Image: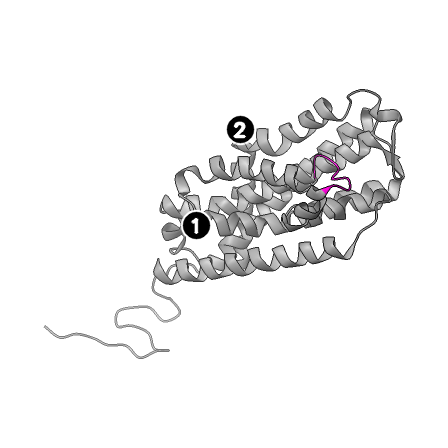
Amino acid sequence: MSTTTTTPGTTPAGATPGTTTATRPRIRTSTAVRTYLVVELRRSLRNRRTLIFSVVMPPVFFLIFGLQGDYTNQSAGSGNVTAWIAVSMALYGAMVTATGGGASVSVERAQGWTRQLRLTPLRPAAYVAVKLAGAMVLGAASVVITLVVAGATGAQMPLGAWILCALLAWVGSLVFAAFGLFMGYLLPAENVMQILGPVLALLSFGGGLFVPLGDGWWATVAQFFPTYGLAELVHAPLGGELGIAAVVNVVTWAAIFFVGAAWRFRKDTARV
């Protein structure tokens, strides 16, 4: 029995000129990214646990703590105390959402999902970018809902402060997206958020996000917490003084988390 070989650009024996053999359709990477982003957003919206912690809990916490006593009539910079607490809760919601988005990468890897993605044009870096983008979209919803609820229940500050506080809370949460990705690769995947949830709450208290630090000794210790700089940053539009220590804190911790996440990500993709 003889075999027939074909030269590129020629028609195989027995085939009609002008026809081609069946080939798998090629999917563009950009199309795969858009498709997976839509899938990720739909998955997040169907996940009740994600919605509760990301979208429901921050405004609920605000209603519990932001409307106590006479906070609506007590000033805090260019706004009132209620607005100060609203900004804190908006940042907290964005942080929780971003951290969960980063940590979910390691969870899905443990479930074998990243191996399945190797059959698609979606590269590991693009997969991580899509996960973080989905978390940032949900984080934006968390910030907006929290501040809308606050505005409807007595929070007061200038229009420019509303906009700047919202943007700073949303963009600043990227630091904790890297934190979630970094910690997700270091901690057991099956209960990573059960560990990181309480950790975020402790960091928020320790870094002055929930309670003003004052001038005591803890105000000095708090400057080493990764939440300190962001807490100072998001409250700055209300008239607070943004010191150099807060800026250094944000830059330093962002560098630590992003470098750590990149290191663990490269190590993981080289092994899988």
Tag nearer the camera, 1 or 2:
1
User: What is the x, y in percent for residue 236?
Assistant: 81, 46
Give the residue type that dot 2 points to. Arg
Q: Is residue 52 left or right of residue 212?
A: left
User: What is the x, y in percent for residue 21?
Assistant: 34, 64
Mark yes or no: residue 123 visible. Answer: no
Q: Residue at x 74, y 39 (%)?
A: 213
Q: Nearer the viewer, residue 202 or 178?
A: 202
Q: Which label is found at residue 48? A: 2
**Mark 1 vs mark 2, CA separation in Å:** 26 Å
Q: Tag 1, which secondary structure?
A: helix
Q: Residue at x 74, y 41 (%)?
A: 216
Q: Which label is found at residue 186? A: 1
Q: Tag 2, which secondary structure?
A: helix
Which is nearer the N-term, disc 1 or disc 2? 2
Q: Is residue 60 left or right of residue 22?
A: right
Work out which quarter of the rendered image holds the N terminus and state it: bottom left
Vertical placement of residue 48 versus 161, above or below: above
Q: Which residues are magenta?
A: 209-216
Q: Is residue 80 left or right of residue 11?
A: right
Residue 1 lies in the magenta stretch: no
